[in-house]
């Protein structure tokens, strides 16, 4: 019997919790952009975000490559995500930042295991954001994502253009919560002050062992957690095929050096500051929302004071890699018309044999340790096996 | 700073326009749902909830502004659609006068509570905040006001509001997800005296069944006409209307009528905060029954929904609610809401549409605040109640929520 697509809580209560049950299969393209980071800041982030929290748990993490630390910006565009086996389909774009780490554990034979820590995650599909946050673990925010084209599809001599942008909800100047572009990938203009960095040897195929902190705020004590755990998510990436692998300026007519990542300074999304990403330039400009409002109100742009400035960091990727799983041509013919069921098992049609191969498969998730508090102070770290 | 030690509300909601559509429901179905959802011994924590009356309140709320303690003056707004059930609240004791499932209970000091098992909002931030902080099972929708058509026939139903949700059944690879209509609220056009389509016998049968009284339809209508006093002030009108409403639907003039239940329940919203275990998604890694305590801080006014003509001629205010029967949103079936009529799908592949007739819909505009949220029970990873465990590892620290080190925009309590 195939399990329902959506979790229902409690069982048979018919209140769908809108998270999709794992394990999953993913079909589509995954892009990785390597971003150089300052070793000291990134290590401080790792200690503050993870190691200091894990004191007493028996787990500890270190940077995989402290001499040449790289943060991986992963942009996925899945035209099909489904439970495993086939339970219906939906599509999602996501943007995540991963820090390559090495895991250590007291009295364990898994010391030295390599993986990535997933932080700053965004998804275009609310179901994906909820599933990631509430079931898989990594806190994932809903965001608008626009993809006009990708750099490999632009002519080498094309004018600078924004390929991809991600706009989560942020707090605006007037206190209102609005959607604003925070991260974008662009073809950069000339005059870019590039920073010489050693290319990273990290490969997208290594994105098969992801660590994350699963965390929920306490309803009575905001700012505190009612539950948190360290989770490990495994993937089988063998179904992915390499499409692009730009590693140096000489590759593909030097097009890697014409890419840039633009990340806006925002207190709610301190990606560059927290991860210590090395920037090539800092652009200041008038806040576009305010300028648009001024135009709308007066018919002309008003003078903008210094406080109206926003700042964008410009970053140059050290590598750009694209891998693909599945074939859109085959999948397009497969109509995803299965009804959602919350109370009954899905009588799903048989999985399309064309889709069985060439996908990314979730290879199991594990809660390594957890702690929680009710109305009392927190309990210490507990391993599920204990 | 420990936020819980301040008197500042967790969230404040200002200028909230609430439209309430009471819907008759089957009480045994409702109770069956509440037993599974709240009274499950795994997480009820010694509490028992009994359905107070056979009504489900469909509410459409337009929030003027919402702000939270964590982000100062940041604010947002939203539209919200919810199904609310009014409950009587009991707590387990040694020798109580109430017996449920072989255990003794007494009435909880709070008396009443409410539960909203189906909530739809059009603000993504609110979806995640509501679910992950407070256990409100919110889904994302969009709400579209619909302009009335030109010169509809008198008595013709005209859609005024259309509510759409994400539908997996509409997803085809290579295309963006989209919203499909799950509900429409319609209002009859023109003068509708005597053209409601609600049979008098049906109304009488309903009021007899509901209130246990044998009042005549004419008596009911006379009471209704007395309510409609155009010279009354807003506050006076709502007081008068609600008292008459209470009398009308409860069948008595003293004691705990249905409206008394309704207002008493507003202060306590029971939520189930539940998150799945990634290793076993059918099992919780964390679940907690919680009581969100709210307080109405200002009432701007209120009254009946619908035209005077509709109110003096029928009890539905001229409204009809069309619910597209998607299995992902089984609110009507789950809560036992009585359906007046079902339309067959217009096209192959479309869902059937259930048409609901509200009973005395009304509105009010208010400010309210979420004062605090108190866990009633907690369990993790399939354990029994956490409070019952003898943990020797009790630590005196309070781990902080730390979403990637930044100022948490999710901290806007857009719940």
Image (cartoon, coloured by chain):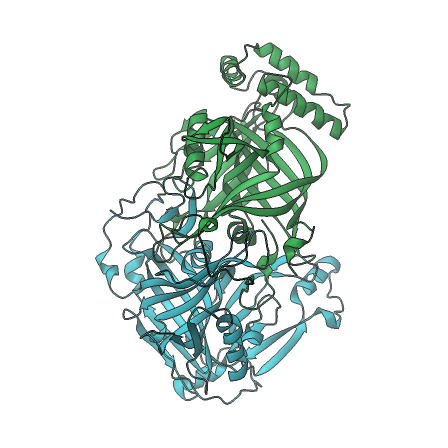
Chain colours: A cyan, B green
Q: Residue at x 61, y 65 (%)?
A: B407
Q: Is residue B127 above or below residue B35?
A: below
Residue B270 image offset from top left, x and y in percent:
53, 41
Q: Nearer the viewer, residue B5 or B343?
A: B5
Q: Nearer the viewer, residue B414 or A356?
A: B414
Q: Residue at x 64, y 58 (%)?
A: B2
Circle count = 0
Q: Residue at x 59, y 82 (%)?
A: A281
Give left or right: position of B167 versus B133. Answer: left
Q: Is residue A319 above or below residue B398?
A: below
Residue A297 image offset from top left, x and y in percent:
73, 57
Q: Nearer the viewer, residue A120 or B32?
A: B32
Give left or right: position of B32 versus A356. Answer: right
Residue B195 image offset from top left, x and y in percent:
55, 18
Q: Residue at x 34, y 37 (%)?
A: B348
Q: In the picture, which quadrant includes the C terminus of chain A?
A: bottom left
Give left or right: position of B23 versus B370. Answer: left
Is residue A143 visible from the viewing direction of this image?
A: yes
Is residue B178 visible from the viewing direction of this image?
A: no
Residue A269 image offset from top left, x and y in percent:
57, 67
């Amino acid at each position: 019997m195939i399990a329902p697509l959506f979790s229902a809580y409690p069982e048979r209560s018919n209140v769908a919790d809108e998270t999709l049950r794992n394990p999953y299969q993913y079909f589509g393209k995954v892009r990785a952009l390597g971003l150089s980071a300052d070793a000291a800041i990134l290590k401080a982030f790792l200690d503050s975000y993870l190691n200091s929290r894990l004191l007493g748990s028996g787990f500890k993490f270190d940077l995989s490559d402290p001499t040449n630390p790289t943060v991986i910006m992963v942009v996925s565009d899945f035209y099909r995500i489904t439970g495993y086996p086939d339970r219906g389909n939906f599509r999602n774009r996501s943007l995540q930042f991963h820090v390559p780490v090495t895991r250590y554990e007291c009295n364990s034979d898994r010391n030295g295991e390599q993986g990535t820590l997933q932080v700053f995650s965004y998804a275009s599909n609310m179901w994906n954001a909820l599933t990631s946050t509430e079931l898989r673990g990594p806190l994932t925010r809903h965001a608008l994502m626009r993809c006009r084209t990708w750099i490999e599809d632009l002519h080498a001599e094309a004018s600078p253009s924004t390929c991809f942008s991600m706009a989560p909800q942020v707090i605006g100047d007037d206190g209102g919560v609005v959607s604003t572009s925070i991260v974008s990938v662009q073809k950069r203009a000339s005059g870019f002050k590039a920073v010489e960095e050693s290319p990273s040897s990290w490969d997208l195929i290594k994105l098969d062992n992801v660590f994350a902190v699963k965390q929920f705020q306490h309803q009575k004590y905001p700012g505190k957690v009612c539950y948190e755990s360290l989770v490990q998510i495994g993937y089988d990436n063998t179904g992915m095929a390499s499409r692009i692998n730009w590693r140096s300026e000489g590759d593909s007519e030097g097009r890697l050096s014409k890419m840039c990542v633009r990340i806006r300074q925002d207190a709610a999304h301190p990606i560059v500051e927290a991860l210590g990403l090395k920037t090539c330039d800092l652009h200041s400009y008038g806040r576009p929302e305010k300028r648009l409002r001024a135009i709308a109100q007066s018919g002309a742009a008003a003078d903008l004071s210094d406080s109206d400035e926003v700042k964008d960091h410009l970053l140059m990727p050290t590598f750009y890699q694209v891998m693909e799983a599945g074939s859109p041509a085959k999948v397009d013919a497969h109509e995803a018309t299965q009804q959602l069921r919350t109370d009954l098992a899905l009588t799903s049609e048989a999985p399309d044999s064309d889709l069985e191969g060439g996908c990314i498969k979730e290879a199991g998730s594990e809660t390594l340790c957890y702690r929680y508090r009710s109305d009392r102070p927190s309990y210490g770290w507990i391993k599920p096996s204990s | 700073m420990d936020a819980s030690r301040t008197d500042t509300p967790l969230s404040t909601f200002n200028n909230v326009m609430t439209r309430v559509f009471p819907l008759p429901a089957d009480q045994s179905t409702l109770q069956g749902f509440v037993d599974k959802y709240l009274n499950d011994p795994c997480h009820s924590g010694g509490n028992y909830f009994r359905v107070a009356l056979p009504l489900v309140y469909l509410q459409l709320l337009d929030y003027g502004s919402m702000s939270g303690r964590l982000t100062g003056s940041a604010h947002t707004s939203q539209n919200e659609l919810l199904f609310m059930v009014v409950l009587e609240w009991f707590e387990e004791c040694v020798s109580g006068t109430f017996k449920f499932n072989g255990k003794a209970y007494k009435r909880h000091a709070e008396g009443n509570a409410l539960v909203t098992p189906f909530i739809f909002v059009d603000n993504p931030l609110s979806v995640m905040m509501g679910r992950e902080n407070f256990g409100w099972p919110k889904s994302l929708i969009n709400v579209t006001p619909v302009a009335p058509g030109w010169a509809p026939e008198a008595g013709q139903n005209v859609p005024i509001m259309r509510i759409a949700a994400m539908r997996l059944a509409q997803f085809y690879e290579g295309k963006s997800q989209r919203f499909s209509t799950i509900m429409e609220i319609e209002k009859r056009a023109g003068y509708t005296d005597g053209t409601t389509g609600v049979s008098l016998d049906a109304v009488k049968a309903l009021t007899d069944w509901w209130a246990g009284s044998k009042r005549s339809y004419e008596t009911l209508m006379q009471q209704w006409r007395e309510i409609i006093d155009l010279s009354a002030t807003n506050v006076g009108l709502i007081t008068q209307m609600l008292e008459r409403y209470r009398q009308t639907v409860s069948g008595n003039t003293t004691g705990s009528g249905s409206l008394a239940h309704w207002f008493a329940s507003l202060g306590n919203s029971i939520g189930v905060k539940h998150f799945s275990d990634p290793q076993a998604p059918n099992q919780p890694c964390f679940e907690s029954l919680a009581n969100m305590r709210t307080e109405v801080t200002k009432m701007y006014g209120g009254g009946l929904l619908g035209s005077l003509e509709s109110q003096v001629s029928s009890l539905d205010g001229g409204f009809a609610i069309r619910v597209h029967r998607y299995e992902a949103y089984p609110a009507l079936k789950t809560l036992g809401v009585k359906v007046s009529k079902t339309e067959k799908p217009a096209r192959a592949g479309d869902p059937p549409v259930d048409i609901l007739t509200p009973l005395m819909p009304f509105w009010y505009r208010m400010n309210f605040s979420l004062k605090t949220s108190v866990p009633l029970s907690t369990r993790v990873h399939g354990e029994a109640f956490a409070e019952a465990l003898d943990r020797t590892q009790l630590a005196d620290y309070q781990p902080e929520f730390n979403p990637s080190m930044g100022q948490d925009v999710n901290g806007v309590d857009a719940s």
